[in-house]
Image: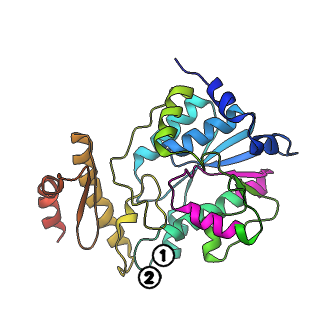
Amino acid sequence: MTRPELVDELFLDKQWVKYLKDSDNINCAVMFSGGKDSALTLGILDRIGMNVEALHFVNKWTWSLSTSESKRICDILGIKLNIYDITEDFVSNVVGKVEGRPCTYCKSIMDRKTAEFCLTNDFRWIAEGDNAMDSSIKRIREYESKRGNPNLFISRYLDCVELGEELPESIEVIRPLIDMEPEYTEDLLLKAFGIKVNKTHEIGDKYEFYWREGCSLQYIESGTPLTEEVMDMVFDLNSKATDYAKQHGIRSSVYFPSRRIVTIPQGFEDDVRDYVEGYITEIG
């Protein structure tokens, strides 16, 4: 039994909710990975009366599960889903130009595309699912402190500003979960909307500046020149590792080029290595 009224009890008296609802434009584009945080963000904003649409970005190296989960969740919530393949833009921005994990560059493309969507479709708001444990909080706080804004719920920060790309003046960013612990978001999503997200079984490298739910390329190590061949290899290795992890109810990922294996919980590293050993040998 779902209880969407939980959202009313928890959020309707919040100052940022009143600010949103008093806005002359309640159109909101939710950057939607298909994970629990962005799913809850989507549900909350829809429930409080915003006109929301979900924007889901993919490239050649993201997991198909993230897209299928995005479709499933938007279908449950009755929210329009827009899917954009940014492979071409991504490749042109990183191949031969970037070393190591390309997440910041990929995120900036997504930020830019979202801002373009808002300007084209008269959307005032962009929403993200950052929670209280996300590494983004420090960057958001530093950026907003320069603007004299102590309110992290509503800001003008997106990761693209790290590459010198400012958000258009007509757009603001809302983060409904910015003070919420990640364990609570999963619980609230289930209780309020009856949604349990199917996970990709990767470790999620949250503490390396930025990570995106369902992308293998975050496991490319510093100093590694990016080519499509390298990205193909990282995708294939992690496909095998997450396949093992799914079978055994754990999380696992492989870093490249060291091929260091990390599992959550620890203790499965040798088993994962054995599982992918033949494949690792095959690709050299």
Mark 1: few, some, or many residues within 10 Å (few <14, many ≥20)?
A: many
The residue identified by callout 1 is 94
Above or below — where is 127 with respect to 247? below
For the point 68% across and 73% down, which residue is it?
165
Q: Calculate the distance from the C-alpha at mark 1 to the C-alpha at mark 2.
A: 6 Å
Above or below — where is 273 with respect to 83? below
Above or below — where is 85 with respect to 18? below
Q: Determine the secondary structure under disc 1.
A: helix
> What range is drawn magenta here?
116-144
Q: To which quarter of the image does residue 80 belong?
A: top right
For the point 25% across and 46% down, which residue is it?
245
Find residue 26 and report its horizontal and vertical position in percent.
80, 43
Find residue 208 and report its horizontal and vertical position in percent.
43, 67
Q: Can residue 84 be seen in this view?
A: yes
Q: In front here: 185 or 109?
A: 185
Find residue 19 and report its horizontal and vertical position in percent.
81, 45
Q: Which mark is residue 96?
A: 2
Does the magenta segment cover residue 99? no
Does the magenta segment cover residue 126? yes
Disc 1 residue type? Answer: Val
Mark 2: few, some, or many residues within 10 Å (few <14, many ≥20)?
A: few
Q: Determine the secondary structure under disc 2.
A: loop
Disc 2 residue type? Answer: Gly
Q: Quadrant of the C terminus?
A: bottom left
